[in-house]
Image: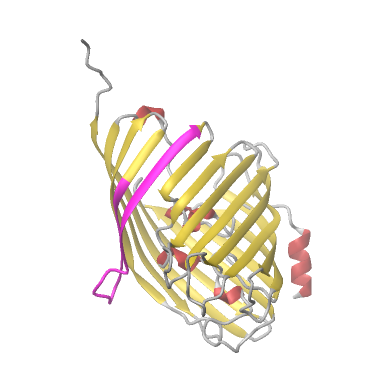
Amino acid sequence: MKILLTVLIFVTSLSLYAQFNNSLFNNFENISENDSLKLNFDISNQNFLHNNEYFNNLYDGYTYLGYSLLPNLTFQPVKNLKIRAGWYLMKYSGKTDFWKSVPYYNCQYKFAKNINLILGNIYGLTEHNVIEPLYSFDNQFTKAPEQGIQILSNFNHFESDIWLNWENFIVPKDTAQEQFTLASTIKIKTCNKNNKLQINIPLQGLAYHKGGQGNYTTTNYLQTYFNSAIGIEAEYRLSANSEKIIGTKNYFATYTDVSDTIMHYYSKGYGFYCTLFSKFKNFDFMIGYWHSKHFIAPKGDFLFQSVSSKYTIWWEPNKQIVTTKLQYSYNISQNVKIALRGESYFDIIRKNFDYSYSLFLIVNKSFFIKKFSNATNKY
């Protein structure tokens, strides 16, 4: 395995995605001046089967079968401001009630050519492009929708996503704890976007906090955890405008517990995540190697961590995992996408094999209702 790790690090030069091709879940749309004063009715629908077959002491496997639905009205009152309002629903098969049923509101302000400010519900989850050890893919089926504030920027040689996801709000003398995640992902792009070879430098950081000054419960301690990742990622397109791509992505990740009272067995840790990937038309493939010591990430996938969500006295200080992912995706139409995915995780130290498989059907459709006149009354 040391030879495999050496080879992966040596070929560090070629990534298209921060972890895997999850772009089919993306909902972000840039503001167009031509859409001023337009009123649209939009439907976002995700149908999913995501089955985790896990056999370990860290995390129980779950089967997520169901759908999410977001009907909403979108209106652009001026050329650089868009408002979206609707209702978000998530339903699991076999459950009578909705898992999530909450109002949805999004205000997007484009205050510069390449910079957007989002307030309310933000463009989150897989759209943040955070690596799996820091941010679990399963959040897509349990944590939606995120809400808070977000700043998105995209330039020729620089792009970033800075966000605050406020997960639990409290008032004075509340017995619950406030919870929020403050994070950023930055990508420095060293090559011209038209080059066949693209080399990027990613910087990722997440801070998760539980506490609050208004909390009067003495049994709940203030908790603050930091995770970060820095690396190099690149892709090589086999020919101009080709859908055949090969690449590699490599990260060094850290964990630090800066809480007043340390709750976990480990207060600091690190990990290396090295992957190779390829994309050939409708197929995406990735193989990766994770090596870590004393690593914990509150928002990350539990299979990469040194602590257990099942047993309070179970720790795995050192981790060595080989993971593979294969996905077939197909655009049925401009507004409908389908994807099949398989994933495997082999723990080298404990000789443990876990896997998952998924089916996704994504529908995003916009219906034009009316364009209002900009004429003013004349006296």
Residue 17 in view, yes or no: no
Which quadrant: the N terminus?
bottom right
Q: Residue furthest top?
A: 379
Residue 177 point in image, percent of width and height: 47, 69
Residue 190 point in image, percent of width and height: 70, 41
Closer-to-camera residue (111/44) = 111
Closer-to-camera residue (274/197) = 274
Which residue is rendered at x = 71% and y = 56% of the image? 231
Closer-to-camera residue (131/353) = 131
Which residue is rendered at x = 33% and y = 53% of the image? 104
> From the viewer's perspective, is residue 40 above or below residue 308?
above
Residue 140 in view, yes or no: yes
For this view, does 159 lie left or right of residue 180? right
Residue 167 point in image, percent of width and height: 45, 62
The coloring applied to the image is secondary structure
Chief secondary structure of the magenta span?
strand
> From the viewer's perspective, is residue 330 above or below residue 94?
above
For this view, does 195 lie left or right of residue 167? right
95 magenta-colored: yes
Which residue is rendered at x = 53% and y = 60% of the image? 181
In this figure, what is the number of numbered marks?
Answer: 0
Which residue is rendered at x = 20% and y = 10% of the image? 379
Quadrant of residue 311 within the rendered picture: bottom right
Chain part drawn in magenta = 85-111
